[in-house]
Structures are given as structure tokens and as C-alpha cells.
Image (cartoon, helix red, strand yellow):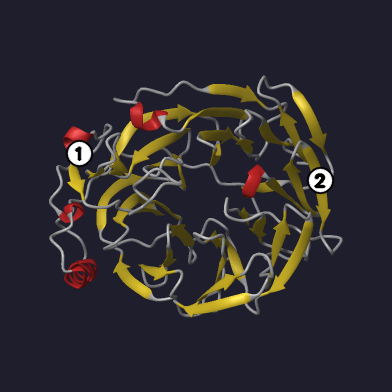
Amino acid sequence: MSLPAFFLPRAVPRIVPRTLPTLAALSVAALLLAGCGSGQNPSAQPASGQASGQPSSSDAEESPHAEPRLVTTYDGGVQVLDGETLQVLADFEMTGFNRINPAGDGRHVIISTANAFKVLDTGAWTDSDGKHRVAEPALTGLEFAANKPGHVVHHAGRTVLFSDGTGVVESFDTADLTASKDGEKPETDIHTAAEAHHGVAVELSTGELVLTLGNDGERPGITVLDADRGEILRNEDCPGVHGEATAADEAVVIGCETGVLVYSDGVITKIDSPDSYGRIGNQAGSEESAVTLGDYKSDPDAELERPERISLINTATKQLQLVDLGTSYSFRSLARGPHGEALVLGTDGALHTIDPDSGAITASTPVLSPWEEPLEWQQPRPTLTVVDHTAYITDPSANTVTAVDIESGTVTATGELEHTPNELTGVPGVLEGHSHS
């Protein structure tokens, strides 16, 4: 995979009022509300049009339940969607190729822009009294300046930002995002890698930092630093290091062109691919499972390999299993369900559910028409993200997003978008790991 093309400056945010969704989104909302037989959803009320700043409980309406939010990028901006009705709640104009990741608090999303990590408040959260709140989504004004902002990783109550241009690792308590006001930056810890590279870092509950090694010429492995940032372990048997996932018991998996490295219980273990070149560069983990889900490519000479096998890495037994899906997929096709299910969106248009322990494909739910992965990784393609028990899937060819109940395989809603969606992520509207009722 080529490195990101680092972007252009951002324009001024533009808010789309909630009272102006597409007709399709209004129809979906009406059907959902009618089916529930309840009063009007607070999130569908007209909004204040707030464009910046951190909404507070005094600015928000109370909701009877947690309200999920989706965030999608398009060529020219970022949109926030209601996770139930799929209507557009806000639209922020933003030039360049921007990347998005959940901050980890169930509320905020961090946008990797041209020269900073910028924080977007999706406008749904649970306050200190346990009350569910909704407000107009807003750019908070909070920024973390960076040279080529890259990966964002949240784990164990900490959020870690990695700057590809400098190797700077900046981490902070995730909860501090909600506490910050008027763009006030949370207190951060900063560590700089020995050399700048396209990398990633994971901070564990012990304070240890798992950090990739590399430079412009090569990325050979990882180092593990203690809470005081002294090196305690290193492994350089991981050419082309890329991507990370965390499994149960804080086992960290880092991908290589020859397998993966697993850091757990104070030990780094190399698990080799069955092929001499077996690249695992994108992974999805779950605290509910000791197994991580990864892609798998075995042709080093392909302009774009369209693999049909996925990898399952058991961090407890240190074994790697390959599963033939019978269809290809892309790097945005991998996700995990609420019980640790491995989910893959195939180019056959189906959402495939895989038992991570046995590797058995337990369900295949048709969602889209068959599609083909584009050659350029920045180009839009169907994308999968999961919030709680719902899988959300975009279709750039139709400018739609579809919600699928993971357990039943039922399509619960489809919403139309004005713009062609590219990246997609979501937040539950409540602190992750807590009840969403």
C-alpha cells in the first residue's frame, strides 16, 4: 500500500440543518419512528446550527437512549449522520484527503488533516449523571499540530496520535476530550521515535508503548517501551511493518510482509506466514476474542492484489489460520462484531460472518451489488464499520449507506447521501464498553 497523499488546507465548516435531510432519509426516519410507536426522536429536532466549540449538557436535549453517530468523508468535506435514521445531521467543508478514526470516548472522532489532528464532536454522549444527550455536531476547535498526521489508536482509556512526518507520538487520557472547552488541549505525553516513518503506536494499561520502527527506506519491526519510555524489548523480524490490532488480554498484533508480531505477557512472538511473502497489513481486533482478523496478500509483484483469503491470528496459541472466502475484499472490508465475530465485506456484495476460533463462515448477508476494488487506495470503495450490534456499509456507486443487524442479518435501514462517501467510522453515543441501552 502506498503512503497517504498529504492533503490540502481545510476550508470553513458548513452546517447542514437537521431539517433538510434527503427525501430518502426522511422516509427511513418516518418508518423507524412509526415502527417504534414512540414519540419523536430528539435527534430529529431542528438544530441550533452550532459550527464550532464543544457542546455541553446545557446546550443539549435529553434522549431516552444512547444515539449512535456515523461520520463519513467525501471529496470536499466530512458529514455526520444519525446512526438510526441515517439522515445527515451536519456537513463540514474540508478540502484534501482526510482520514477519520473514533477517539475512543464514544462521542468524538479525530480527523487526520493536512497539518493537524482535529477533533469533531458528533453531538451524542452520556453525561456524568448517566443521562443521554444530543446536540448539533460541531468542530471543537481542538487541534493537535502534526507533520503528516497518520494513525489514531485508542486503547485502555488512552488515545495515541502518530505523526508520520516526524515520528512524534502524542497520547492523552481519552476522557479529557469531553472535559476540554473552547479548544483547550488535554494534557499530553510526547515521545519521538528514533526516525520518522509511516507508523503506529499503542499504549497499554501498564503505560507501556508498542511502537513501530522504520524510516523512509524500510520498516523492519517494533520496539516496546516501559512507562518511562525506556526500551525493554525489540524485534526487527517484521519487514514492511504496518497496521495494528489489540485482542483480549491486551495482546497487540502488528502486521508484517512475512506474518505478524504479537506482544503479550512481556514477550514478542513472531508468527510466520505459510508463504515466503504473506503480507498482513490491516487488522481488526476485539476485546471479546483472543483472535485478530487480518487481510492476507501473497503476490509481491501484483499492481493490486485482490486476495480471497483472510488471516486469523490466535494470540493465545500463537497460530495463524487462513480462510478462503471465495470472494475478494479490500482493506476497508474488515471489522468485528459485538461478540468478537469476524466480519468481512466481500466484493460479491455480501457481509460475511466468520467464527474467529474455527474459521467457519457462519453467515453471508447480501447487501450490495458486486463491486471491484479501485487501483488507488484513496479512491472510494464500499466500506464497513460497526457500532454496537449494527454493521454500516457504504456504496459509493449509489451514494448510499446501509445498516445491517449483525445477529439477524437483516437490513434495517438505507439512507441516501448527497456526496459520494469515502471513509466511514462511527461512535455509539456512550462511553465505549458500557451499556448502550
Give the label on residue 50, or none.
Answer: 1
Q: Is residue 349 above or below residue 341?
A: below
In the rendered image, residue 420, in percent from the top left (x then y), is placed at 38, 62
Q: Is residue 84 above or below residue 360?
A: above
What residue do we see at 40% from left, 76% from top?
Answer: 410
Relative horizontal placement of residue 335, taking residue 201 as reference (left or right): left
The N terminus sits in image quarter: bottom right
| Outermost residue, right side | 276
Q: Mark 2: which secondary structure?
A: strand
The amino acid pointed to by label 1 is Gln
In the rendered image, residue 393, in percent from the top left (x then y), is placed at 43, 66
Q: Which residue is mark 2?
A: 269
In the rendered image, residue 146, in percent from the top left (x then y), is placed at 52, 29
Mark 1 nearby-residue class (10 Å; few <14, some 14–19, many ≥20): some
Q: Mark 1: which secondary structure?
A: loop
What residue do we see at 75% from left, 33% from top?
Answer: 223
